[in-house]
Image: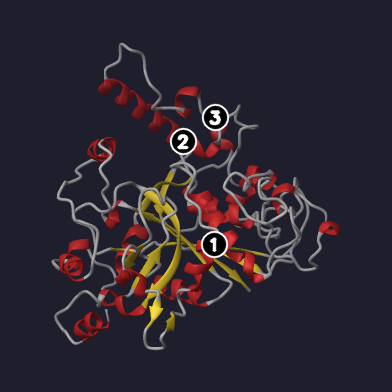
């Protein structure tokens, strides 16, 4: 690894370690060119499959054959955490120790579980982040639940609790968040409706499917004992922090208007020392250098964590939009480690900063919508647009009908397309 880095640093024609010099390329090929294959040749990697993915039907066909594909052709250089070379990137060989950027990797692995279904990447990422903070003395009492379950100040055994960690009954009295325990009165008001409000439906499992980054931000804020919620619909960034403890009624519409929101149905306090900041990677406002600086800074701070939203297709992976935590950064290769919560599909992967920037700059077709109340307007057909049709329907006709219902649902929800981005949780 050291010889590889040394040889590239001395090679003026090499583009492998010069991603930082290219800020806004017009295409992935313009940045990587043939170097993506040189990278794969020089570093051990998963076997390259030659099957081309032309559309979603090919993706579905590939999945139906159950043939593992760790990358599709045409993507940027990736290095999966599955061999000695990839492990070495977690270390700083100049000091013969773990890199200053790698602490999050080891802390996240202590509570990093696979997403329980293919729509729960957001909740799985939040769960991993919360569990990683168990060792920093940030938690309130066992079972506090914070703004999720509602608890009075007298219940606090810690005079200055900062994080409310759910306690799964299976693990009680030990604090360990699971994806089923993240939701309560706060999240129902500000993030997503659950079965009691949607006639038995899980809001994450119906259109628009999953959570967007703004919802992930508020889901996190529901577990940091703090009162304000701020709109994250601006095109650059938004911060939610513990700056006030104002009372009074409020609505989700107030949040969408950019006002601080107080959840009347749950106890919220201003004694947390954490802030939760969402940044959308809008190329007109956020540069590669800004993204790299924010992520590197957070990785160096012991009580900061990062969750990103990105496009798998932009990385040459199979799938669409995805959310996962960031676990490390390797300066010589200018690459970040994505700790993929779909652990059944991909291992963690080192991604060049330029490629990650491009993947986060891809738009989310429903990055903004009237959550959570708009889901109440969905009809049965809109909630399950791709449910099996009658026997008289051909496969193509059923697929077309499903897509029509899905598009109608997106309209009812008020979906707007905005860039993806990253969320940084920081202890102030």
Q: Nearer the viewer, residue 329 or 68?
A: 68
Which image quarter holds the C terminus?
A: bottom right
Q: Residues within 10 Å of mark 1 (few under 14, many from 20)?
A: some
- Residue visible at 59% across and 37% down? 373
User: Which residue in the structure is indicated by mark 2?
Assistant: 207
Residue 187: horizontal and vertical position, in percent? 63, 46
User: Which residue in the structure is indicated by mark 1?
Assistant: 110
- The way the protein has been coloured in the rendering is secondary structure
* Secondary structure of residue under mark 1: loop
Nearer mark to the viewer, of 1 and 2:
1
Nearer mark to the viewer, of 3 and 2:
2
Q: Are marks 3 and 2 in contact (CB under 8 Å)?
A: no
**Image-based side of 345 in relation to 131, left or right:** left
Q: Residues within 10 Å of mark 3 (few under 14, many from 20)?
A: few
Task: State which quadrant residue 64 falls in.
Answer: top left
User: Which residue in the structure is indicated by mark 3?
Assistant: 377
Distance from the alpha carbon under mark 3 to that under mark 2: 11 Å
Residue 92: horizontal and vertical position, in percent? 39, 82
Nearer mark to the viewer, of 3 and 1:
1
Q: Would you say residue 232 is visible in this rendering? A: no
Distance from the alpha carbon under mark 1 to that under mark 2: 32 Å
């Amino acid at each position: 690894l050291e010889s590889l880095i040394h040889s590239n640093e001395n090679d003026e024609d090499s583009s492998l370690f010069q991603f930082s010099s290219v800020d806004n390329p017009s295409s992935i090929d313009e940045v990587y060119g043939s170097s993506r294959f040189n990278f794969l040749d020089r570093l051990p990697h998963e076997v390259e499959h030659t099957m081309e993915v032309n559309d979603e039907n090919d993706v579905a066909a590939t999945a139906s054959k159950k043939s593992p594909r760790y990358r599709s052709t045409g993507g940027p250089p990736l290095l999966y955490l599955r061999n000695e070379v990839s492990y070495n990137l977690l270390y700083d060989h100049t000091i013969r120790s773990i890199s200053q950027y790698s602490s999050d990797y080891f802390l996240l692995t202590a509570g990093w579980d696979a997403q329980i279904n293919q729509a729960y990447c957001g909740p799985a990422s939040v769960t991993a982040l919360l569990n990683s903070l168990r060792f920093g003395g940030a938690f309130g009492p066992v079972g506090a639940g914070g703004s999720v379950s509602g608890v009075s100040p007298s219940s606090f055994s810690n005079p200055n609790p900062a994080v409310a960690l759910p306690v799964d009954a299976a693990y009680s009295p030990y604090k360990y968040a699971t994806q089923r325990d993240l939701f309560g009165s706060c999240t129902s008001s500000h993030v997503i409706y659950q079965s009691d409000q949607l006639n038995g439906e899980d809001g994450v499992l119906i259109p628009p499917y999953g959570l967007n980054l703004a919802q992930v931000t508020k889901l996190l804020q529901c577990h940091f004992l703090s009162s304000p919620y701020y709109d994250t619909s601006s095109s650059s960034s938004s911060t939610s922090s513990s700056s006030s403890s104002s009372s009074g009624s409020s609505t989700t519409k107030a949040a969408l208007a950019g006002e601080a929101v107080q959840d009347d149905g749950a106890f919220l306090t201003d004694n947390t020392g954490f802030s939760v900041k969402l940044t959308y990677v809008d190329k007109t406002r956020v540069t590669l250098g800004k993204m790299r600086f924010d992520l590197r800074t957070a990785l160096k701070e012991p009580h900061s964590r990062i969750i990103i939203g990105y496009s798998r297709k932009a990385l040459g992976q199979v799938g669409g939009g995805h959310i996962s935590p960031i676990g490390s950064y390797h300066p010589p290769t200018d690459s970040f480690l994505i700790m993929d919560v779909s652990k059944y599909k991909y291992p963690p992967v080192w991604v060049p900063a330029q490629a990650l920037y491009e993947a986060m700059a891809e738009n989310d077709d429903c990055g903004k919508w009237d959550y959570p109340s708009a889901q109440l307007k969905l009809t049965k057909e809109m909630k399950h647009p791709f449910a099996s049709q009658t026997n008289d329907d051909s496969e193509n006709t059923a697929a077309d009908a499903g897509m029509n219902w899905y598009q109608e649902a997106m309209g009812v929800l008020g979906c707007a397309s905005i860039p993806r981005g990253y969320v940084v949780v920081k202890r102030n």
